[in-house]
Structure formats: structure tokens, C-alpha cells
Image: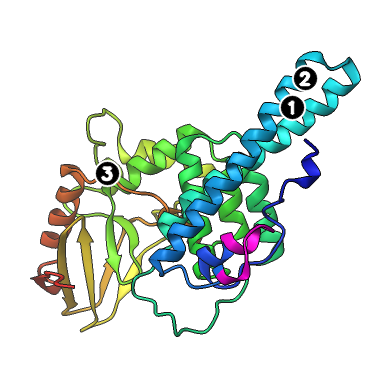
Amino acid sequence: MDITTIPDIGQKAIKNGIGSFIASQSDIMSDKYQRHIGKLNEIKSLNEMIVSESKIYDNGIEILTNKYMSANSEDRIRIRQDLEYMEGKKRQLSIYLKSLAYGTDKNKTTNEEPLKPIEGHWIDKFNELARKRNEEWRSDLLARALACEAETPNSVSPRAIWLMGHMEESLFIALSELLNLCVRILPDNIPLLPNSKIQALDRIISNSSKTVGNLVFQLADIGIVADHLTSSRQYDVKQGFIVKYEQTQFIITTKQKLEIRGILFTPLGDSIAKFFNPTWNSGGISVLNDWVESISAQADIQPYINTI
């Protein structure tokens, strides 16, 4: 098999969300699939197409593997390069496929104007990372990032995608443990771990002897956690917002100026945090309840039940 006959996914720009992005990436996918991600029949078709294209690479890998056994030394070098190329393309397709599950936005309608395309340099860098032998957690982050960038171009910075592609697993674990404790400020879903009767740095990680301070120290060099001594989030008098942890939510309306201190994240940290799937735990519930209690004199606090 000549690998030049295998369609090369990854060279064209996105047009209408992640579904149309996947369609536009493959030369074997026709224009009739250039529609919005929200259509379930399109998602099914795109899944089938990606699976079908992945089988093309499977077939090519099998053929080249068989040829390798009888090839001379010079041909083996070329075959190894071709095998590496096709295996990378399969990994890239796998992340594209996973991104479809994260890309559906039920609140969007098919009457919206077409979305702007992803920048070429962004998708080039993404494809480079997607073709690597990524761990499951990293593939998941990249898939979520692709879905987000496809629906809202320029929402995931090149620095963020680079960090997700190169972050050491120990840092991923540390960031996950920290985010597992964080409350979220709506509507932007901003994570933070506020000081209350217990300082944020002194919080103990669930099922561990580590403190939040240990995690912050571990993450200090990658620029995602803000300086806890100088950073804060401030709200004016009579300003309202919602704070939540898992399904527990409160409406906060300030009686006086409110300053939240503790562990906050940089814009880079906020950007990456939205791609993590937190593991809710009793420690995070304590963070929320302790903080709400600590600001009771500064704000009106009401439980909030989201009925949507």
C-alpha cells in the first residue's frame, strides 16, 4: 500500500463547530456533512466516518508490518517511518473521535451563523500533539480542548494547548487534586479555593497527608496558580453571584465590599481548569460550607436550586 493514497486528516480549517471540523479534516468526507454539531444524525455519521478512516490506517499498518519481515535494511527504515506516521494518524483520529462527545452544545440552534475557523497554526500544533503516544488523561484533555476551540475559536491559547501536551503526569495529578477541592463561581465556572476559618494552604487533601500548600509549591513553576499573597477576587456592594460545589449552590448578594482571598488561578490556569473533570468529595463540600459561613456577615446567602 502506498501511504500517499491514505487521506490526510488535519490540513483544512474548521467551519461550523467540532462536527464540521472533523468533516472538513478528511478528504473522503463530503460537503453534506458540513453542518452543525448539534444534529444527532451528523454525530453518528461523523463517528462512523472516523472509525472507517481509522480502519484504513489499520489495514495499512498490517500490510506494512508484513512487508517489514521480508524487507532489506534500507526498506525497513522507510517502512518504520511509514508505520510511525500511520500509527500517529490513528492516535490523532482517536482524539478527534473523543472530541465529538464533548462538542455537542444543546443550547445552540442550527440557525446560527457559521463559526469562524480555527487558526492554522493552532490546529498544526494540536495535530502534532495528538499524534504522540499520549496517556489517557492527556488525550482526554486534548479532546476537550479541541471541542472547545472548535465551538469558540481563540478560546484556548497556544500556550494552554502546549502545556496540556507537555505537562508531566505528577503535575496533572497535583492540579487535579487541587481542582477537586475548589468551589466554582458562576456563570464563568471560575475555580478557587477561598480562605475561611481554615486557610486555603492548610487544607488537607482527601485520603492523603499532603496539604494544599504542598500542591501549590509543586505547581509553582508552570504559571497556573496565582500568587496567594497578592491575588484576590473582589465584589462591590449589592453585587450578586452564584457559588457552587458539585450540586450544592448558593446565591451570594453582598452587603458590603467583599474580597475573596485564597488559592486563585492565573488566566492560563483558568483556561486549562475547564478541561478537567473534578472528583467531588467531602473536603470540597467543607470548603464551600466553611467559606459561606465565614462571609455570612458580609452577604445575604440563599440556597439555589437550578431547575433548568
Q: Amino acid at mark 3?
A: Thr
Amino acid type shown at disc 2: Tyr
At 38% across and 68% down in the image, what residue appears? 105
* Mark 2 or 3, closer to the camera: 2
Q: Badge 3, how many Cα within 10 Å: few under 14, some, many 20+?
A: few
10 Å crowding of disc 1: few (<14), some (14-19), many (20+): some
Which comes sooner in the sequence, label 2 or label 3? 2
Give the spatial CA distance, label 2 vs label 1: 6 Å
Residue at 24% of width from left, 81% of height from top? 239
Q: Which residue is mark 3?
A: 279
Question: Residue drawn 50% across and 69% down?
Answer: 151
Q: What segment is highlighted magenta in the picture?
A: 22-32
Q: Based on the picture, tell me whether residue 260 belongs to the magenta stretch.
A: no
Position of 268 with respect to 284 (left or right) is right
- Between the C-alphas of marks 2 and 3, the distance is 46 Å
Q: Which residue is mark 2?
A: 68
Q: Which residue is mark 1?
A: 64
CB atoms at circles 2 and 1 under 8 Å apart?
Answer: yes
Q: Secondary structure at mark 2?
A: helix
- Place of residue 141 in the rendered image (x, y in percent of width and height, measured from the top left): 47, 48
Where residue 190 appears, x then y in whole percent?
Answer: 35, 63
Of residues 287 and 26, the one drawn nearer to the viewer in this rendering: 26
Q: CA distance from mark 3 to mark 1?
A: 43 Å
Whole-percent x, y for residue 133 in the image: 59, 33
At numbered mark 1, what does the secondary structure look like: helix, strand or loop? helix
Report if residue 164 is visible in the image: no
Could you tell me which residue is drawn at 17 percent across and 58 percent down?
Answer: 247
Where residue 23 sits: x, y (%)? 59, 62
**Which image quarter is the C terminus in?**
bottom left
Closer to the camera in the image, 219 or 71 = 71
